[in-house]
């Protein structure tokens, strides 16, 4: 069997054309669940998780089922009442999108794992990733003249798979603080899911100590990772550096990004964004699963898990 390192070495040695005949490298065993989630979400049957599509609905149902299997608890007070099918039970929360942003109904999907430290469990860390993508909405694509489906494997099936992996780990071994795992809808159309979440939060925003956002974490190259918005709290820089026991080459950026962490930053909640960088397939039909670096996603989840477990408790004012 060909292992990942051999395939990469071949690519380096043979350069152009040399890899075409090689089968894609298998994911490392630890990443198999991540691959299962990503493959489901990025499948053409999910229709690029476009707002209002049946593919988006089945993606939402899949995420709810995976939260349930992990042993996490639902978050919302009421079952989701939407014209479009919501996940059953209290996993989903529907909201209306304005007509100028294509209209339709968005559905956030969320789960909760209670903190294990009685002194800290009233504080909540939000871990988020948007699960929507642009599907056939060519006006949001980088190749608008070409019809077809943009599957969004990196953007953001990768982050959603990372979110689900972290939820499994934290459900199995809770963190000191309570964690809310939120798969946001309608990020691509203008951060609508995260803005709705904060406008009607399942726990008061004052209790949200921090937010970790995964958006495009599937294309790690040479151990490089960007962590954006570390300027949103004095302790982020130290927290990320301390957690980097894996010697990732991390570019810590004070601000930046345009994903759901911005909604939290605007609400004065310290929020960072894990990001493995843009690429030629961004918002194009070629953002497909075959380009995903599963070992890279695993390394991002490992780092985020260490940050989450070692996060400083909020000060007395919070
Ligand atoms: Zn994205």
Image (spheres, rainbow, N blue to C red):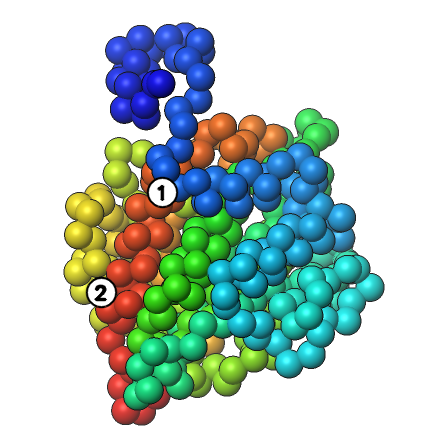
The residue that disc 1 covers is 30
Tell me if 245 is positioned left or right of 91 in this view.
left
Q: Residue at x 21, y 44 (%)?
A: 249
| Secondary structure found at label 2 | helix
Q: Residue at x 58, y 33 (%)?
A: 284
Tell me if 35 is positioned left or right of 144 in this view.
left
Mark 2 vs mark 1: give the one in front: 1
Q: Is residue 237 above or below residue 34?
A: below
Q: Nearer the viewer, residue 209 or 268?
A: 209
Cβ(mark 2) to ligand 1 < 8 Å? no
Q: Nearer the viewer, residue 259 or 161?
A: 161
Q: Residue at x 57, y 75 (%)?
A: 75
Picture quarter with the N terminus: top left
Q: Is residue 80 above or below residue 14?
A: below
Q: Residue at x 44, y 34 (%)?
A: 292
In the image, farthest residue toward the bottom? 317
Dot placed on the residue nearer the N-terminal end, 2 or 1: 1
Q: Quadrant of residue 87?
A: bottom right
Task: Give the x, y percent position of residue 80.
Answer: 72, 71
Q: Are marks 2 and 1 in contact (CB under 8 Å)?
A: no
Task: Give the x, y percent position of residue 64.
Answer: 60, 60
Q: Quadrant of residue 171?
A: bottom left
The residue that disc 2 covers is 239
């Amino acid at each position: 069997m060909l292992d990942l390192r051999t395939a990469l070495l071949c690519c380096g040695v043979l350069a152009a054309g040399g890899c075409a005949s090689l089968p894609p490298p298998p994911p490392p065993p630890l990443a198999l669940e991540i691959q299962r989630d990503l493959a489901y979400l990025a499948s053409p049957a999910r229709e690029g998780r476009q707002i209002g599509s049946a593919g988006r609905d089945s993606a939402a149902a899949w995420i709810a089922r995976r939260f349930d299997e992990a042993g996490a608890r639902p978050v919302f007070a009421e079952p989701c009442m939407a014209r479009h099918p919501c996940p059953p039970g209290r996993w989903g929360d529907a909201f209306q999108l304005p007509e100028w942003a294509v209209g339709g109904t968005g559905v956030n999907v969320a789960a909760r794992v209670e903190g294990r430290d009685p002194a800290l469990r009233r504080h909540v860390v939000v871990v988020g990733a948007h699960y929507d993508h642009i599907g056939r909405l060519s006006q949001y694509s980088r190749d608008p003249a070409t019809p077809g489906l943009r599957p969004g494997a990196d953007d953001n099936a990768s982050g959603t798979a990372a979110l689900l992996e972290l939820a499994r780990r934290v459900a199995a071994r809770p963190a000191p603080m309570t964690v809310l795992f939120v798969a946001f809808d309608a990020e691509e159309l203008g951060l609508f899911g995260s803005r709705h979440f904060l406008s009607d939060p399942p726990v008061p925003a004052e209790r949200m100590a921090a937010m970790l956002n995964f958006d495009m974490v599937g294309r790690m190259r040479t151990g490089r990772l960007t962590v954006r918005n570390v300027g949103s709290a004095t302790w982020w820089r130290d927290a990320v550096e301390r957690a980097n026991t894996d010697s990732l080459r991390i570019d810590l950026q004070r601000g930046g990004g345009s994903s759901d962490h911005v909604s939290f930053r605007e609400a004065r909640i310290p929020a960072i964004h894990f990001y493995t960088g843009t690429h030629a397939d961004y918002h194009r039909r070629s953002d497909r699963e075959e380009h995903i670096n599963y070992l890279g996603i695993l390394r991002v989840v490992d780092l985020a898990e260490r940050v989450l477990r070692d996060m400083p408790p909020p000060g007395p004012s919070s």
